[in-house]
Image: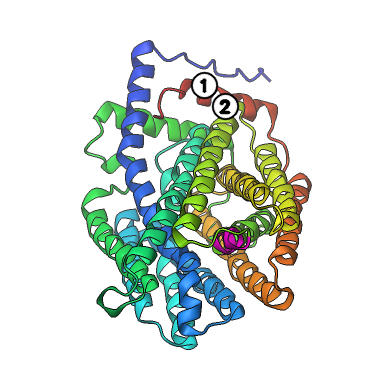
Amino acid sequence: MPALVQPVPTIPSAAERATREAAYRTITWRLLPFLMALWILSWIDRVNIGFAKLQMLGDLKFSETVYGVGAGIFFVGYFLFEVPSNLLLERVGARKTIARITILWGICCVAMMFVTTVPAFYLLRLLLGIFEAGFYPGVILYLTYWYPTGRRARVFGLFMSASALAGVIGGPLAGTIMTGLDGANGWSGWQWVFLIEGIPSILAGLVTLAYLTDRPEKAGWLAPEARALVAADLARDAAALGPREHRILASLADLRVWQCIAIFFCIVTANSALTFFGPTIVREAGFTDPATVGWIMSGAYLCGGAGMILNGRHSDRTGEARYHCGLAALGGSVSIALLGFLVPGSPYLALAALTLAIVGTMSAIPVFWQIPGQFLAGSAAAAGIALINAVANLAGFGAPAAMGYLKEATGSVSTGLWLVAAFEFATVILILAFIPAPAPRRQAEARAVAAAGETALP
């Protein structure tokens, strides 16, 4: 029997490399700024409750537990509709799906200004989760239509850093609105926050219908040669990854999907606690002015965004994901535990620990999303990514509710922070236990793709 002859890889010409990099640069500039803008609006409308809380609880006589449950119940709606929304995106396209999501969450955010009772508060937070469900995993899935594996961690990092930019923008904006417009037109500052921050989302959803392109083959703004090169890259990437699960039901029963859920659950626990109780932690450290709290959170999220981008770039360059995710989570865990000891006795050290906690936790997220794509594809990827995000984000309900209850019971955020730190540390254990190191050949291929694409991203 004759020996199998391995195909000799062809070396692309300089012209072909230039065309390829120009194509990805065009895709990046076309898609990423717009998707990041939508994610900023989404994140602001999701977490502005953390700043509104500083006035809202006193005005409406809500307890810390009521706030914690209301902040977290968002994720119940998120859980229920995440998978259906992503499957709908796979069927009808990203443009229509993302536009629908954006318009509805904007309407719900504006409606929050009229809340006066606990049931209404819970209902609108639940609806906000239902309406926003599918946006985040939908964009993750959407980006896999445009970029091969070796380019994705950086792209995911850029996109997800928008949540940090939202913190940079949203904190000072909410603080300024609450301080400057409190009492205007007979409305409290927290009501103005929901109104002013909800309207742009409604308008952005309408723009989405005219702006987004579903897939590369439909991109009239790409030259035909560029579309062909991107299609060839995606085909080679799929072949290099080998057989992957395409069946929806099989992906939902795949043990690896549930292992990813366990890992991401622990990451989301820390991220949600820091997001919804960050302003409260800053106030407990001794900084009580809403505008000051906003600027402090802004600086912390700016550092978090930088961490996401740098960790994603380094992960692509080395072709390694598990340690980049695990070590970032370890740094977040240690910082959260220290934060529990430093509040409220050491205000400036507490702010430093809070910043490092945000950097570590956020930096783990984009690299994590490299993992499911290594064994899922097509409709199975749509369902699997949505399921991972949906179930794991139930931690977004549990963490704020637990933080609110423990703060009310103990009078301090410290006990809740130590609990959250334990979950974040479990991320490291689960990654080492469940996620195998990539095969040397696959890692070398990822490094080669990353090296070739260094100039493709701004």
Q: Verify CB contact (< 8 Å) between mark 2 and mark 1.
A: yes
Q: Residues within 10 Å of mark 2 (few under 14, many from 20)?
A: many
Colour pattern of the rendering: rainbow
| Residue at which label 2 appears | 317
Residue 451, disc:
1
For the record, the magenta segment spans 277-284
Main SS of the magenta part reads helix
Q: Amino acid at mark 1?
A: Ala
What is the number of the mark on residue 140? none
Identify the element where label 1 is drawn: helix
Instruction: Give the spatial CA distance, label 2 vs label 1.
Output: 7 Å
Q: Residue at x 30, y 65 (%)?
A: 196
The residue that appears at 43% across and 30% down in the rendered structure is 233
Classify 428 as above or below 399.
Answer: above
> SS at mark 2?
helix
Q: Quadrant of residue 458?
A: top left
Could one spot residue 100 in this view of the protein?
A: no
Query: What percent of the width, then of the height, locates residue 156?
Result: 49, 42
- Kind of residue sitting beneath label 2: Arg
Vertical relation: 172 (above or below) 222? below
Q: Residues within 10 Å of mark 1 (few under 14, many from 20)?
A: some
Q: Position of residue 265 (x, y in %)?
A: 65, 60
The residue at the point 31 percent across, 69 percent down is 195
> Nearer the N terminus, badge 2 or badge 1?
2
